[in-house]
Image (spheres, rainbow, N blue to C red):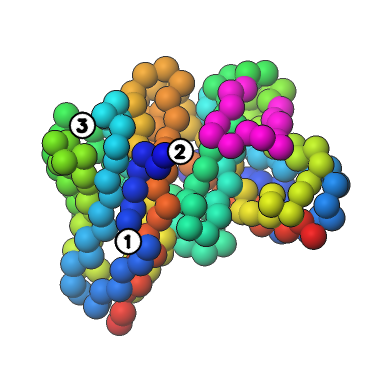
Amino acid sequence: DVKVTQSSRYLVKRTGEKVFLECVQDMDHENMFWYRQDPGLGLRLIYFSYDVKMKEKGDIPEGYSVSREKKERFSLILESTSTNQTSMYLCASSPWGLVLYEQYFGPGTRLTVT
Amino acid sequence: DQQVKQNSPSLSVQEGRISILNCDYTNSMFDYFLWYKKYPAEGPTFLISISSIKDKNEDGRFTVFLNKSAKHLSLHIVPSQPGDSAVYFCAATSTGANSKLTFGKGITLSVRP
């Protein structure tokens, strides 16, 4: 079974703090993604990566950055958190090829910024 | 501009009956569509998909129908079970290098025992 793990299930941070969210997948997938889920807005893509050290902006990259130094690990960085970044953050991975689009998700990190 | 629309935020059905979840899209380049299910405090899990070369794909109790001319797809669950109660997301993409999924807002399905 594909396993995608995220470093924390719940985080509470103060405005202006730096946050690292780490995602690890164990199936040697080439592709990794970061989304945020908000009520009434669905899943919105923040950043994605198709290879080590490669990154591409998604639909809402402002206020975020990412790092992919190893194939299995994809980190989301919030340099200076703001209250509008309170959300559920979901990491996903998928293999290259015909099943590119069937993404496997981690359990999510609920981030609250106060 | 929302390219994948799930206009009904919620649906409630009786156990044993059919659940029909609808999804509309606006981007003509989309040619592959997926449904994901999400329980509270868990990540979404892939449910079923369909390519634009088909108009129907079936997997057990789940069937997805695609109407390309109407840019509409639907997920049918028959028979519905209480364990199907979850949020269902429709997603779409255009095949090719570096394609990404565009998700709808989701529909909350409640199956009453």
Residue A24 sits in quarter: top right
Density class for disc 2 (Cα within 10 Å; few <14, some 14-19, many ≥20) is many
Q: Nearer the viewer, residue A14 or A19?
A: A14
Which mark identifies residue B8? Answer: 1
Residue that badge 3 annotates: B52
Residue at coordinates 28% horizontally, 49% vertically from top-left? B23
Is B2 rendered above or below residue B82? Answer: above
Residue that badge 2 annotates: A103
Distance between the Cα atoms at labels 1 and 3?
23 Å
Foreground mark, 3 or 2? 3
Q: Main secondary structure of the magenta part?
A: loop
Region of the chain picked out in magenta, as a range: A55-67
Distance between the Cα atoms at labels 3 and 2?
19 Å
Three-letter amino acid code at disc 1? Ser
Q: Position of residue A48 (x, y in %)?
A: 57, 29
Instruction: Answer with left or right where residue B40 lies relative to residue B19.
Output: right
Q: Mark 3 or mark 1, which is nearer the start of the sequence?
A: 1
Is A38 rendered above or below residue B81? Answer: above
Instruction: Answer with left or right where residue A82 lies relative to residue A44.
Output: right
Kind of element beneath mark 3: loop
Chain letter for mark 2? A
Q: Position of residue A107 (x, y in %)?
A: 58, 53
Three-letter amino acid code at disc 2? Gln
Which mark identifies residue B94? Answer: none
Kind of element beneath mark 2: loop
Residue at coordinates 85% horizontally, 47% vertically from top-left? A16
Q: Nearer the viewer, residue A5 or B55?
A: B55
Distance between the Cα atoms at labels 1 and 2?
24 Å
